[in-house]
Amino acid sequence: MNIFITRELPGDVLAPLAGLGAVAVSPHDRPLTPAELRAGVAGADAVITTLHDRVGPDVLAAAGPRLRLVANTAAGYDNLDVAAITAHGAIATNTPGVLVDATADLTMALLLDVTRRVSEGDRLVRSGTPWLWDIGFLLGTGLQGRRLGIVGMGAIGRAVAVRAAAFGMEVVHHSRRGTGIGLDELLSTSDFVSLHCPLTAQTRHLIDEAALRRMKPTAYLVNTARGPVVDEAALARALHAGEIAGAALDVYEDEPKVHADLLALDNVVLTPHLGSATSETRTRMAAVAVENVVAVLTGGEPLTPISPSASEKS
């Protein structure tokens, strides 16, 4: 059997694949171009992808009829055309649950950073600009007693809620499954809005110009979900106009590019997609992808299959 892996994976997670057949790992330490991806998957029985690899009909056609599995090394799978993979006769899998704590931790780190102006203060000190403590210097916003509105109450959203409660915050949430409060009410009453919904046709630009205008002028937005859930141009305009107080982003619409107008703002914290970036989490994500390959290619059931209809749910 042939197994193609689009990016080098950490540690010795590939060891279980040794007895299954030929394992090929992309030699490029970067996302593959569409042509490189099509060439790499040709004749593969299984492919291990990362979030940059878009797998649709063209890639499936290049892979051919042997393909049995596309194992995505990520919790999200908006890069996979799951319905097309299923129609091709293959299975799509992801790595849910593994990165819940890491992403929830980063969400709170971003919230604290932007509200307490940590990165802004760090830039000031490093710049060599003279400063002296005074009672009004770099004042931020406390979390205790404030309302956190969570959009998307899945595993990560629930983990953020637990952490927020430890900070003395009131937590409300909105879910398209019908739980919680309405999105308009959440946006208009929350002091902080944290996004944890998947990227679907329904959630693309969920936070647009109209949504941002519903938020309080003192409110902050945090996005550790997927970049296109937020209209970055609209966010930049809202921040410039003082329609909201600040934002913290770990994901971007055209990643790794960031809207130029956001880069110059002091009230925006920007991190390079670090939600799952702990050694333990990234290694476990890769291990789950490998475990899915072993299970399917040895005739078993995948650990974490993605339903063809799941990508339309949030």
Image (cartoon, rainbow, N blue to C red):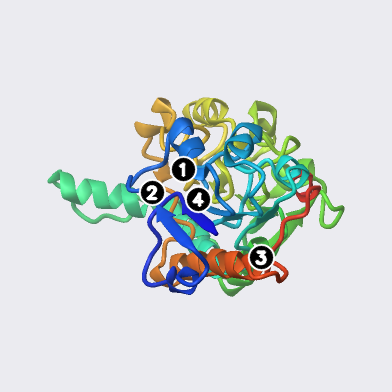
Where residue 92 sits in the image (x, y, percent)? 67, 53
Q: Helix, strand or loop at disc 3?
A: helix
**Cα–Cα span, label 3 and label 1:** 20 Å
Asked if the residue at tag 4 contacts the one at tag 1, i.e. Cβ–Cβ closer than 8 Å, the answer is no
**Cα–Cα span, label 1 and label 4:** 14 Å
Dot 4 corresponds to which residue? 50
**Cα–Cα span, label 2 and label 4:** 12 Å
Pointer 3 local density, CA inside 10 Å: few below 14, some 14–19, many at least 20: some
Please tell me which of labels 3 and 2 falls first in the chain: 2
Looking at the figure, which quarter contains the N terminus?
bottom right
Q: Helix, strand or loop at disc 1?
A: helix
In this rendering, does residue 91 appear at all? Answer: yes
Is residue 272 toward the left or the right of residue 199 in the image?
left
**Cα–Cα span, label 3 and label 2:** 22 Å
Is residue 86 toward the left or the right of residue 233 in the image?
right
Dot 3 corresponds to which residue? 296
279 in relation to 272, above or below: below
Dot 2 corresponds to which residue? 26
